[in-house]
Each structure stands twice: as structure tokens, then as C-alpha cells.
């Protein structure tokens, strides 16, 4: 699995204090997340959507992409507000969250190294009904909304690949809805952990019970019991706000079928390269 390697001098040295935004997401001052480098054409991409493009199509897209380092809980776009950028995560993971009238929130979809955040722009809408924020910090390729819309609208491999990604993403959203209504919290926790593990570099990533309860739309006590059960079976280790996947095969056995359904659709639709 190929990763982007960043030297310390690539990162913007500014460290301004963040402000707290909608639903606890962090709104960073302009430029804080920017990395001062265009994607190197000699560095292989981890992002599955971009990797599915033929070399000549990717070459047309690369000059528009800039590397950004996304901070945990950084807000990428808000409901009914203009989407200004599209993100193609390399090591970051983005949550799409819906907030109900009573203030209750639940994760309705995620985007990581398999795809993108900013899909409404491809569907001819410059706003979204959900909030997108960074679940797991890391690196992403970022492209201006106007440039992306122009490139994606043109007939060709990028357009066809985005159509297939849209189908896979809709499968994820539909399966997430079914999972939330039909399966036990422990199974849903296992599914969420597996999906996140697929997208991060290594077996450990930041996670609190409070955050996972927020994502699953359940009470924190239910998540605490579910995570304890997974720990007792030695499938995961949890300490000080970080979780480690200790037994990947066992965790897949503890999950519901939803994880495999979604993964199979993404693999079928995005692992083949466009011609």
C-alpha cells in the first residue's frame, strides 16, 4: 500500500488556535490546513478513485490538486452552505453527519482513501444537506470546486469513474441506514472500526467512546459496553482515546454483514481502471 511521504518543511508552520464550530467540529483559520506543495506526479496515490483513472486523465487533474493536512474535527462544509473544495483523502477520513431538528446527530456516510468528499458538486449542486468534518486526521488532495466541476462535467474517464463512485457511495448510505435500524450496537461498532481501519495507516487511530456514540447515534453507555465486549474478546485494545485493532479477522466475525456488502461494492466498482 503506497503512501504519500511528507517532509517537515512541506507543512505550513502556522499554528493558530481553532474555533469551535457547528456540532463541535473545529473551524480552522484560513490557510491553517494548507500544505505548500502540488501533488508530485512521481508519488503513487493511495486514493482509490484517483488511482482508477488512466494516466492521461490523472495527469490533467494533478495540476489542480494541492496537498492539505486535515486536522481532527476540521469542518470541510456545512449544510446549505457553498462547497468550496473537493477532497480526495489519502490518509484522512471524513464523516458526513446529519443533524435533526431536536439536535440529535448521526453519521450517514464516510469518505476515506477509497473516494472523495464533495460529491454534491458532481451532481450539479453546490451545497449539501449534511455536515462534513474530519473524523481521522491526515492528508488529502484538494481541488477548487469550480475547477472540479469543469473537469468532472466533461465526457471521459473521470466522469465515468465518478458515476461508479456515486453508485458505491449510495450503497454505503443505504446499508448504513439498514444497519442502524437492524443490528446490535456491538455489531455496528465492529463495522465502523473495520471501515476506519481500512482507511488509516496502521492498526491504531484516535477514538473516544463519546465520538463513536455521536457517529452511531446511540448513547455513550451503549458504546462503552460494546467496546468492552470487543476488548474482552481481545479483538481491540483501547486506552486514552486511542483504539488498536488487535484481531482483524475476529473483528470481521463480530461485525454484521453490512461491512462486507459495502466493501464488495466499492471493490467491484472502483478497483478496475478506466480505459
Image (cartoon, grey):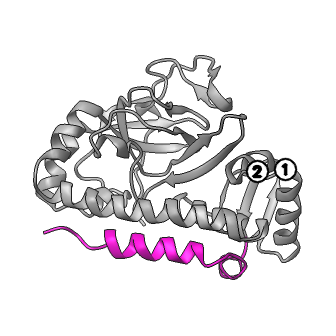
Q: Are marks 2 and 1 in contact (CB under 8 Å)?
A: yes
- Measured Cα–Cα span from mark 2 to mark 1: 5 Å
Determine if the magenta segment contains residue 264.
Answer: yes
| Image quadrant assignment for residue 245 | bottom right
Q: Point out the tag, 2 or 1, that comes first from the N-terminus.
A: 2
Q: How many marks?
A: 2
Q: Secondary structure at mark 1?
A: helix
> From the viewer's perspective, is 59 left or right of 114?
left
> From the viewer's perspective, is 230 left or right of 28?
right
Which residue does the numbered mark 1 point to in the structure image?
A: 220
User: Could you tell me residue 125's position as x and y percent?
Assistant: 32, 37
Vertical relation: 52 (above or below) 144: below
User: Could you tell me residue 201's position as x and y percent?
Assistant: 54, 58
> From the viewer's perspective, is 149 left or right of 10?
left
The span picked out in magenta is: 246-275
Vertical relation: 133 (above or below) 188: above
Vertical relation: 247 (above or below) 84: below
Where does the N terminus fall, quadrant-wise? bottom left
Give the residue at x 48% y 38%: 129
Q: Is residue 53 visible?
A: yes
Res. 213 mark:
2
Q: Nearer the viewer, residue 37 or 224?
A: 224
Give the residue at x 64% y 67%: 179
The secondary structure that dominates the magenta segment is helix
Amino acid at each position: 500500500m503506497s503512501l504519500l511521504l511528507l517532509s517537515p518543511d512541506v507543512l505550513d508552520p502556522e499554528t493558530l488556535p481553532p474555533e469551535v464550530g457547528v456540532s463541535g467540529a473545529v473551524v480552522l483559520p484560513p490557510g491553517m490546513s494548507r500544505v505548500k506543495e502540488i501533488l508530485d506526479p512521481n508519488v503513487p496515490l493511495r486514493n482509490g478513485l484517483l488511482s482508477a483513472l488512466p494516466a492521461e486523465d490523472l495527469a490533467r487533474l494533478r495540476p489542480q490538486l494541492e496537498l492539505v493536512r486535515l486536522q481532527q474535527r476540521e469542518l470541510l462544509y456545512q449544510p446549505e452552505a457553498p462547497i468550496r473544495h473537493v477532497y480526495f483523502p489519502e490518509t484522512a477520513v471524513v464523516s458526513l453527519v446529519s443533524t435533526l431538528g431536536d439536535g440529535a446527530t448521526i453519521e450517514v456516510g464516510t469518505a476515506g482513501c477509497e473516494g472523495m468528499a464533495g460529491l454534491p458538486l458532481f451532481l450539479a449542486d453546490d451545497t449539501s444537506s449534511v455536515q462534513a468534518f474530519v473524523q481521522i486526521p491526515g492528508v488529502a488532495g484538494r481541488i477548487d470546486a469550480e475547477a472540479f466541476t469543469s473537469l468532472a462535467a466533461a465526457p471521459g474517464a473521470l466522469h465515468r469513474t465518478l458515476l461508479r463512485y456515486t453508485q458505491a457511495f449510495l450503497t454505503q448510505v443505504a446499508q448504513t441506514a439498514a444497519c442502524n435500524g437492524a443490528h446490535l450496537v456491538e455489531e455496528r461498532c465492529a463495522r465502523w472500526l473495520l471501515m476506519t481501519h481500512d482507511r488509516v495507516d496502521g492498526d491504531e487511530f484516535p477514538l473516544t467512546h463519546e465520538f463513536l456514540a455521536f457517529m452511531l447515534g446511540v448513547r455513550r453507555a451503549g458504546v462503552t459496553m460494546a467496546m468492552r465486549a470487543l476488548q474482552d474478546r481481545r479483538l481491540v485494545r483501547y486506552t486514552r482515546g486511542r483504539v488498536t485493532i488487535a484481531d482483524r479477522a475476529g473483528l470481521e466475525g463480530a461485525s454484521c454483514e453490512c461491512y462486507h456488502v459495502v466493501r464488495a461494492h466499492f471493490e467491484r466498482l472502483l478497483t478496475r481502471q478506466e480505459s
